[in-house]
Image: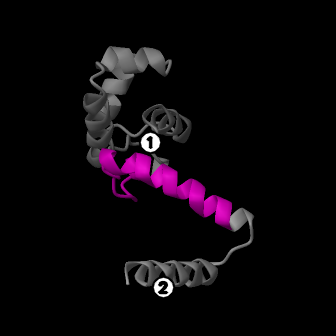
Amino acid sequence: MAKQYDELMGSRIRDLREKTGLTLREVAEQINMDYSYLGRVERGFIPSTNKIKTIAEFFKVDISYLMGEQLEVPLELRDKIKEWRSVIEETERRGYTPEDIEKLLDTLDMISRKNKS
């Protein structure tokens, strides 16, 4: 069976590692992977799904991002997305629909305009 290579995945992993300021050996040690194997992955070798999952979890990205199916979220937006995600989850937990939220926002806009008058 021929080995498969994916340069996009490898470059994304390398970019994530470099953004963290960690060496290949440091990352490999923290995820319990041989550093030479991780180096091959960065050069494009496709590891098993379990290893891809381990790498994605370490860098806190979705596995689909590593596989080229998703764009990277800029670092400066990640905290905001987490914050808003919790708001969305809470509104869903309470049973609010997007339409309910839209009506609420309209009401808040109306109150704001009234207070400015």
Kind of residue sitting beneath label 2:
Met
Q: Residue at x 52, y 33 (%)?
A: 54
Label 1 Cα crowd, 10 Å radius (few <14 / some 14-19 / many 20+) = few
The residue carrying mark 2 is 110
Q: Residue at x 35, y 51 (%)?
A: 77
Question: In the image, is residue 77 above or below residue 46?
Answer: below
Q: Nearer the viewer, mark 2 or mark 1?
A: 2
- Which residue shows up at 30% across the image and 50% down it? 74
Mark closest to the chain's N terminus, 2 or 1: 1
The answer to if 83 sits in the magenta stretch is: yes
92 relative to 67 in the view: left or right: right
Q: Secondary structure at mark 2?
A: helix
Say whether residue 84 is left or right of residue 91: left
Distance between the alpha carbons at the discs numbered 2 and 1 = 65 Å
Residue at numbered disc 1: 1
Camera-side residue: 43 or 92?
A: 92
Front in this rendered view, residue 94 or 72: 94
Locate the C terminus and report the quarter of the image it occupies.
bottom left
The amino acid at mark 1 is: Met
Do the residues under discs 2 and 1 have CB atoms within 8 angstroms?
no
Residue 106, compared with residue 40, is above or below; it is below
Q: Position of residue 13 (x, y in %)?
A: 33, 37
Range of magenta residues? 65-91
Residue 63 — which label? none
In percent of width and height, residue 96 lies at 69, 74
Most common secondary structure along the magenta stretch: helix
Question: Residue at left 47%, top 48%?
Answer: 62
Check the image and report above or below for 38 versus 82: above
Q: Is residue 27 left or right of residue 54?
A: left
